[in-house]
Image: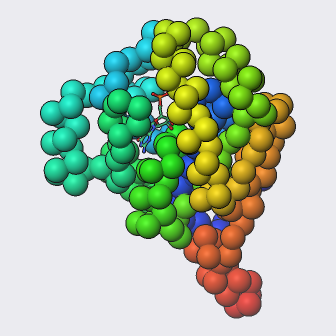
């Protein structure tokens, strides 16, 4: 359901989870829902995985390019995750927010904290938990993209990442991906209906009073 007659300001919707908990599947479903949902594409210094495309999954950059972007203030937030750097290019996000769009972020807890201190009013954050560590490992192995030692490394980091759930507005345990998608859509609907996000409300109500 949309409200074309009432203008709204955009929203940053952050989805964080340990790798493999399902946030990519959930974001893809939201992106398919409509043209007003877009993904923030991060820059990273990590190597592309098989099938990943530059400019679609990430912008793959060298460490020196990354540090130059940080120095130039081009990143809205940035963090070191595992052994690589990741960051969010500022310009794209600002343009989409001004156009009233929903910008989805797949970033870690460090980036979420930075966004929270810089842009709390425009932010809603969701932490996705796996149903169990066994299931997380099964999903990481099943996606077949990472070598065994990378999977082990990610598993060893999972508990630490999961400890950040209390810093998020919403928490979803991803037992059933369709249910998790429905729950994420419900959060998005509610966030869009927040009074202070519907910037055109006063004009809308006034227009009804004047006629
Ligand atoms: P992956 O290498 O599996 O694509 O991502 C590893 C971790 O980095 C994930 O937890 C992901 O959410 C996080 N990440 C990806 N892009 C960004 C970003 O731009 N900023 C921050 N802070 N974390 C990111």
Q: Number of marks in the image?
A: 0
Residue 21 x/y as whole percent: 66, 31
Residue positioned 70% across, 91% down in the render: 210
Residue positioned 78% across, 33% down in the render: 131
Going by the image, does 14 lie left or right of 82? right
Taking 207 as reference, is 56 above or below it? above
State the scheme by which the image is colored: rainbow
Residue 118 in view, yes or no: yes
Going by the image, does 28 lie left or right of 171? left
Taking 211 as reference, is 147 above or below it? above
Going by the image, does 165 lie left or right of 110? right
Taking 155 as reference, is 12 above or below it? below
Residue 160 x/y as whole percent: 56, 42
Residue 74 x/y as whole percent: 25, 50
Residue positioned 71% across, 66% down in the render: 193
Residue 103 in view, yes or no: no
Residue 131 or residue 30, whichever sits in front: 131
Residue 46 x/y as whole percent: 34, 24
* Quadrant of the rendering where the C terminus is positioned: bottom right
Query: Residue 60's image quarter?
Result: top left
Residue positioned 59% across, 59% down in the render: 167
Residue 151 or residue 101, whichever sits in front: 151
Residue 103 or residue 160, whichever sits in front: 160
């Amino acid at each position: 359901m949309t409200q074309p007659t009432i203008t709204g300001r955009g929203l940053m919707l952050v989805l964080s989870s340990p790798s493999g908990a399902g946030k990519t599947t959930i974001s893809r479903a939201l992106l398919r829902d409509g043209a007003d949902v877009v993904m923030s594409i991060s820059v990273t210094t990590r190597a592309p995985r098989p099938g990943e495309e530059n400019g679609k999954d990430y912008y793959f950059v060298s460490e020196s390019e990354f540090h130059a972007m940080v120095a130039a203030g081009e990143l809205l937030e940035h963090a070191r995750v595992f052994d690589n750097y990741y960051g969010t290019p500022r310009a794209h996000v600002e343009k989409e927010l001004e156009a009233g769009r929903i910008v989805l972020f797949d970033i870690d807890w460090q980036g979420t904290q930075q966004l929270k201190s810089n842009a709390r009013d425009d932010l809603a954050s969701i932490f996705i938990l796996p149903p169990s560590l066994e299931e997380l490992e099964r999903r990481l192995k099943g996606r077949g993209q990472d070598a065994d030692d990378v999977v082990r490394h990610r598993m060893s980091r999972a508990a630490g990442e999961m400890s950040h759930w209390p810093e998020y507005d919403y928490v979803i345990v991803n037992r059933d991906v369709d249910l998790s998608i429905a729950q994420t859509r419900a959060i998005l609907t509610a966030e869009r209906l927040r009074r202070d996000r519907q910037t055109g409300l006063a004009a809308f109500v006034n227009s009804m009073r004047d006629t």
